[in-house]
Amino acid sequence: MEWKDKKVLVTGGASFIGSHLVDLLLAKGAQVRVVDDLSSGRTENIEAPLSQGRLELVKADLREPGVTRDAVRDIQVVFHLAADHGGRGYVDLHQAGPASNLFLDGLVFFEARRAAVEKIVFASSGCVYPNFLQGNVKEEIFLTEGQVAPPYDADNLYGWAKLMAELTLKAYAKEYKIKTASCRYFTVYGPRGVENHAVMAMIARAFIGQDPFEVWGDGTQIRNWTYVEDIVRGTVLAAENIDDGTAVNLGTRERIRVIDAVSETLRYTGRSAKIKFLPDMPVGPLNRVADNSLARKLLGWEPRVSFVDGLHRTIDWYFSIKNKEDVRRILGEKLTER
Ligand SMILES: NC(=O)c1ccc[n+]([C@@H]2O[C@H](COP(=O)([O-])OP(=O)(O)OC[C@H]3O[C@@H](n4cnc5c(N)ncnc54)[C@H](O)[C@@H]3O)[C@@H](O)[C@H]2O)c1
């Protein structure tokens, strides 16, 4: 796909991941429109291209009458990232908000088809994988795309909505002959990340010098945290290489325990603290790591940033721009809200 002067819409483009995708698309020469209601996105994330006049920003809720129809007008490629979404605390404790994604996603796809866009790329999630596969920390499992199949068992209504959107896009490709692709992001972190996600919360706790240092669960949960630059590079490759609605994992194969990520965060930031485990807080699936061989095969994609390297870069960013009083004030609420 030739990106030069391509007319691209990024819904939710002021978000953490969305803003990195916008940066990459602009660097490739695309003409980018962002529609974002700023419910969790921030204009600071896209301040540079905005101030240089290289980006069109529409501040609006896509669910309001006419907004999505206007958003897709004259657009060739839609990257749909707007979502009611938060970290583990939010996804476990809130169902009604994420359920609204069913309506939002359906509307975006419906209007994109009506406007005859060339392609729709969707930001899906590891939350579409069956919970029953991810409960044993002793197993060395790597989730493969085909495991999202009956009996479905997605992760909260957030995961069910992502799953329905994926299936919708598959059906659109088959029946309406629209080119579509879904990318299953796995626990993304990096600069501009928000404290409602585990790695960012760890960094925030180290930043304010929390002691005892709180860890949700017993710390043995396993994740494959994936660096945001790798995620957006994979998303663009999916736009270039997938047409038939295939959903592809974008995640590393690194198996990191929460407690080991905490230890490295404390070590790198020069902090020492007593660890306080909070077993009653939401932990999500105990063992979630992606297989990424399909992405390698279809996209030629492999993650380039190791967890340790990405963690250090993210800590450097966080410590260089945050203010301790602000972080202390917002952290408690952020952990369970958007
Ligand atoms: N961060 C992760 O680890 C992760 C993992 C899997 C999937 N995802 C998906 O990636 C996408 C981006 O997530 P993120 O973590 O960067 O942050 P995010 O959740 O803040 O991104 C959502 C963006 O959509 C905007 N938005 C929400 N509802 C809207 C509406 N009705 N109209 C217009 N804009 C609206 C928000 O303001 C925000 O900018 C989301 O779809 C999310 O579900 C993220």
Image: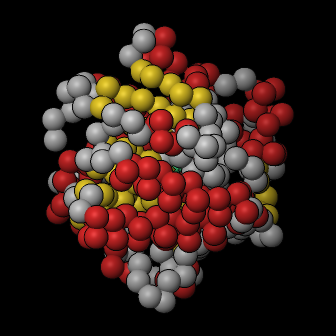
79 and 172: which one is in front?
172
Q: Quadrant of residue 309?
A: top left
In the image: residue 6, left or right of residue 316: left
Q: Position of residue 68 (x, y in %)?
A: 51, 42
Image quadrant containing the N terminus: top left
Q: Position of residue 29 (x, y in %)?
A: 25, 24
Residue at x 69%, y 34% (from the top left corner): 207
| Vertical arrangement, residue 47 with respect to residue 126, above or below | above
Q: Point out the residue furthest to the bottom here.
A: 151
Q: Is residue 255 visible?
A: no
Q: Is residue 102 visible?
A: yes
Residue at x 36%, y 59% (from the top left corner): 182
232 and 205: which one is in front?
232
Residue at x 18%, y 61% (from the top left corner): 298
| Vertical arrangement, residue 171 with respect to residue 66, above or below | below
Q: Position of residue 142 (x, y in %)?
A: 38, 74
Q: Quadrant of residue 122?
A: bottom left
Q: Position of residue 140 (x, y in %)?
A: 41, 78
Question: Across the whole image, how many numbered discs are drawn on residues?
Answer: 0
